[in-house]
Image (tube, rainbow, N blue to C red):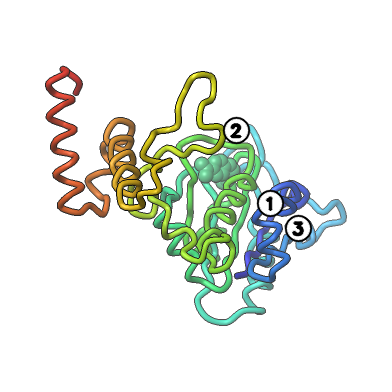
């Protein structure tokens, strides 16, 4: 999978791309990230890419020309349906389903904006989608672009060690993860749950499923309405809710 990232700060991507699983994915040839410096598409000698807003007010707005021409140049290299995604706080909210959907594409172009924003005509002319990673404003679209590359890369077959990869996460089924433990068995007086030491695989997977359901109910109960639940899951949740209401928890 190939990401083309249009940015005025290509160096910002070094840390995330040169470490851990993303670095390995690149070395294995499963992931490629082309960093495109928007300034290379500026037409003036100062390589400027922004200007003051029409109508006045403070700050700077990114000019359409360098961004639009950079996108068009990259699109010439590819065929088929290549999403051109603008990272911005007004976009559709990014989540695990959007990550899975984006992972179906061979190429994706990400545009990182800066300053007070981007000239509206970039949206009209080249963007096919706008994505927000959450309801907060950042100084630029670079961190959101890195979040998207990371979350999407986990869905590329072979990127995670496990052959089932990201689809086996309980998150993929719309639940929070169950608790995990490793050595030692007793740490500062706290024991690892007995069932995990039992070697009884069926009991272990029942325990994990129930812990994931409990955690999701307590921390993110709205997620349960979209989750992939079995009849047994629903029976267990009913039992949990009855016990919580007896305790006066709502
Ligand atoms: N929540 C996000 C994305 C970008 C960003 C920018 C218009 C601001 C937050 C275009 C306004 C880009 C997000 C850069 N902040 N800042 O995903």
Residue 249 drawn at (x, y percent): 20, 20
- Could you classify mark 2 by the number of other residues whose Cα lies within 10 Å: few (under 14), some (14-19), or many (20 or more)? few
What separation in Å lies between label 1 and label 2 (alpha carbons)? 43 Å
In the figure, 192 relative to 133: above or below?
A: above
- Kindly identify which numbered label has been placed on residue 37: 3
Asked if marks 2 and 3 touch (Cβ < 8 Å), the reply is no
Disc 2 target residue: 57
146 or 189, which is in the foreground? 189
Q: Distance between the residues labelled 1 and 3?
A: 25 Å
What number is the disc on residue 225? none
**Mark 3 residue crowding within 10 angstroms, few (<14) / some (14–19) / many (20+):** some
- Asked which secondary structure carries label 3, the reply is strand
Q: Cα distance, mark 2 to mark 3?
A: 27 Å
Callout 1: few (<14), some (14-19), or many (20+) C-alpha neighbours within 10 Å?
few
**Residue at the (52%, 67%) spot, across then down:** 83
Nearer to us in this view, 232 or 108: 232
Q: In this view, does 231 lie to the left or right of 226?
A: left
Q: Quadrant of residue 218?
A: top left
Q: Which of marks 2 and 3 is nearer the N terminus?
A: 3
Picture residue at 73% right of the left edge, 60% below the top: 35
Mark 1 or 2, closer to the camera = 1
> In what element is the residue under mark 2?
loop
The circle drawn on residue 20 is 1
- Given contact means CB atoms under 8 Å apart, are the residues at marks 1 and 2 in contact? no
């Amino acid at each position: 999978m190939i990401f083309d990232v249009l940015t005025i700060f290509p160096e910002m991507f070094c840390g995330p791309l040169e470490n851990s699983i993303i670095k390995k994915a690149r070395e294995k040839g499963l992931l490629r990230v082309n960093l495109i410096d928007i300034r290379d598409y500026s037409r003036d000698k100062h390589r400027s890419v922004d200007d003051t807003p029409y109508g006045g007010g403070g700050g700077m707005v990114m000019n359409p020309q360098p961004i639009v021409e950079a996108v068009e140049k990259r699109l010439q290299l590819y065929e088929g349906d290549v999403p051109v995604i603008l990272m911005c706080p007004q976009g559709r909210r990014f989540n695990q389903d959007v990550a899975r959907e984006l992972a179906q594409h061979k190429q994706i172009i990400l545009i990182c904006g800066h300053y007070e924003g981007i000239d509206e005509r970039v949206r009209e002319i080249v963007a096919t989608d706008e994505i927000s990673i959450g309801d907060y404003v950042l100084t630029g679209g670079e961190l959101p672009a890195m979040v998207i590359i990371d979350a999407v890369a986990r869905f590329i077959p072979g990127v995670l060690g496990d052959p089932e990869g990201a689809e086996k996460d309980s998150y993929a089924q719309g639940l929070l993860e169950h608790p995990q433990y490793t050595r030692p068995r007793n740490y500062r007086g706290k024991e690892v749950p007995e069932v995990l030491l039992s070697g009884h695989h069926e009991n272990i997977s029942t325990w994990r499923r129930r812990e994931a359901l409990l955690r999701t109910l307590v921390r993110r109960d709205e997620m349960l309405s979209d989750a992939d639940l079995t009849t047994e899951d629903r029976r267990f949740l009913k039992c949990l809710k009855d016990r919580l209401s007896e305790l006066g928890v709502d």
